[in-house]
Amino acid sequence: MSKRKKRLLGASGFLLALLIVWLVINPPGSFGWCRFALTTYGGVPHLISDIQLREDGEVRHIEKTHDLKLSDVVWLLEPCPDVLIIANGWQERVQIGDDITGLDQCTVEVLSTGDAVRRYRELRRQGKRVAIHVHSTC
């Protein structure tokens, strides 16, 4: 085997190993590596953007805001979840409107982003229908 083929084979093996490690850390259909300004869901990194994940698995990016209103999260309520989690930032700087926290149709939990992602995982493992709004920065 030529040196060039050996290098290509080695590089391919290295890239495959990196892909496997990435998918172990960031599994499809779940939250993975999340840090300030980075939210990974379904193996896809979302940089400096807020995302919403409905109970039925639909995901969307939304405009970043530090003043969250009901109109910003109404998309998350269809289909109706058991629990709506609002991740209000890593430093909890997002202001949540009373119209959200006072919802009657589901339980609303407001948590820091790291705690919100952990709580989402926990509730999903329990079989709960959960929707989440994730603010990825402050």
Image: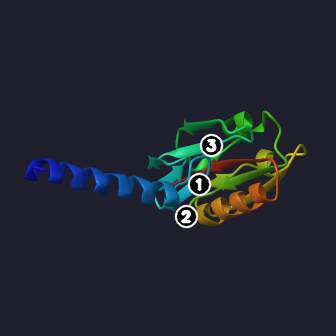
Specify the label residue 105 is tagged with: none
What's the residue type where badge 2 is placed?
A: Trp
Which-is-in-front pick, marks 1 and 3? 1
Question: In the image shown, does 117 or 6 lie closer to the viewer?
Answer: 6
Q: In the visual, does 15 lie left or right of 119?
A: left
Task: State which tag comes first along the sequence, 1 or 3.
Answer: 1
Q: Secondary structure at mark 1?
A: strand
Which residue in the protein does label 3 denote? 52
* Residue lying farthest to the front in this orientation: 1
Q: Position of residue 31 (x, y in %)?
A: 59, 54
Q: Position of residue 21 (x, y in %)?
A: 44, 60
Question: In the image shown, does 93 or 131 lie closer to the viewer?
Answer: 131
Name the residue located 80 percent from the left edge and 52 percent from the top edge.
Answer: 101
Name the residue located 85 percent from the left edge and 46 percent from the top edge.
Answer: 103
Which residue in the protein does label 1 denote? 31
* Residue lying farthest to the left in this orientation: 3
Asked whether residue 98 appears in the rendered view, the answer is yes
Which-is-in-front pick, marks 2 and 3? 3
Q: Position of residue 56 (x, y in %)?
A: 73, 37
Question: In the image shown, does 36 or 79 lie closer to the viewer?
Answer: 79
Which residue in the protein does label 2 denote? 90
Vertical placement of 59 versus 20: above or below?
above
Name the residue located 71 percent from the left edge and 33 percent from the top edge.
Answer: 75
